[in-house]
């Protein structure tokens, strides 16, 4: 007679259940596609970007990308919306309304400088969109809506500062926004040519801190009553 022995399980030994397959997460899938699309558009521009390359990076199919975004152009629009949305949503978390006017302006300037310095992809994509004459920004009501918030917030700070006798009363919020962003953007967008022509490393910490303080002082002196 053949005796078959079976492995006994100790009472305190955990029983491993079969692994259940993960359910699809549409939001996570969209986010992954957007992140890889940013890389592709930054490296290749809109014209040179390939949906195939994006699909390869996240091990999916072109069909899946088109399912979520419809076309390469619509994917590019949503990349723009994401990048603009990221900076605007972070600005909203600065709690500028809770700060004194001088402190609020300084925090906004420092945030803008740091954001542009750390987010080269944002600067690159905006530069690409300017090459296309803002054709795709025009297609997005969301981008226009979210960017009015920074002017509204800035306008309130300027008004408070004027009422306290700190700031001039004849200042346009858009002009101040341009003054802040122009230097912060330019030193990143032109970092390679500036670095080569003037032999300066704009990523050097001492240089960044000097420029950061310079733009803060420039804006505050412009606003001074």
Image (cartoon, rainbow, N blue to C red):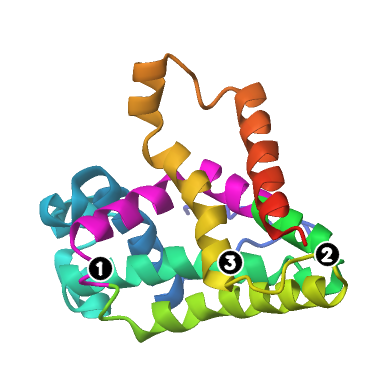
Near-viewer residue (100 or 13): 100
Q: Which residue is mark 2?
A: 166
Please tell me whether mark 3 or mark 2 is closer to you in this view: 2
- Quadrant of residue 15 within the rendered picture: bottom right
Instruction: Identify the mark nearer the N-term, 1 or 2.
Output: 1
> Residue 200, percent across and down?
47, 18
Instruction: Identify the mark nearer the N-term, 1 or 3.
Output: 3
> Residue 17, percent across and down?
58, 66
Mark 1 Cα shell of 10 Å, populated few (<14), some (14-19), many (≥20): few
- Quadrant of residue 75 within the rendered picture: bottom left
**Distance (Cα) linking label 3 and label 2:** 68 Å
* Badge number at residue 134: 1
Left or right placement of residue 115 versus residue 108 in this view:
left
Q: Secondary structure at mark 2?
A: loop
For residue 19, say whether it is visible: no
Q: Secondary structure at mark 1?
A: loop
Q: Which residues are magenta?
A: 110-136
Q: Quadrant of the C terminus?
A: bottom right
> Residue 183, percent across and down?
50, 45
Near-viewer residue (114 or 220): 220
Q: Which residue is mark 3?
A: 17
Q: Residue at x 32, y 81 (%)?
A: 140
């Amino acid at each position: 007679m053949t005796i078959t022995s079976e492995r006994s399980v100790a009472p305190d030994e955990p029983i491993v259940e079969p692994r259940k397959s993960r359910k699809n997460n549409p939001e996570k899938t969209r986010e992954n596609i957007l992140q890889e699309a940013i890389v592709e558009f930054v490296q290749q521009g809109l014209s040179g970007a390939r949906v195939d390359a994006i699909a390869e990076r996240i091990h999916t199919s072109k069909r899946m990308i088109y399912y979520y975004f419809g076309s390469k152009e619509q994917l590019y629009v949503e990349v723009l919306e994401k990048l603009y949305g990221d900076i605007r949503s972070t600005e909203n978390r600065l709690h500028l309304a809770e700060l004194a006017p001088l402190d609020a302006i300084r925090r906004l300037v420092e945030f803008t400088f740091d954001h542009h310095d750390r987010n080269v992809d944002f600067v690159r994509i905006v530069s690409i969109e300017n090459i296309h004459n803002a054709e795709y920004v025009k297609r997005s009501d969301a981008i226009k809506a979210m960017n009015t918030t920074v002017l509204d917030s800035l306008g309130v700070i300027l008004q408070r500062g004027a009422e306290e006798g700190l700031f001039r009363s004849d200042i346009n919020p858009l002009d101040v926004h341009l003054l802040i962003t122009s230097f912060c953007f330019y030193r990143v967008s032109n970092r390679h040519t500036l670095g080569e022509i003037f032999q300066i490393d704009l990523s050097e910490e001492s240089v960044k801190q000097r420029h950061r303080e310079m733009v803060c002082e420039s804006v505050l002196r412009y606003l001074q009553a």
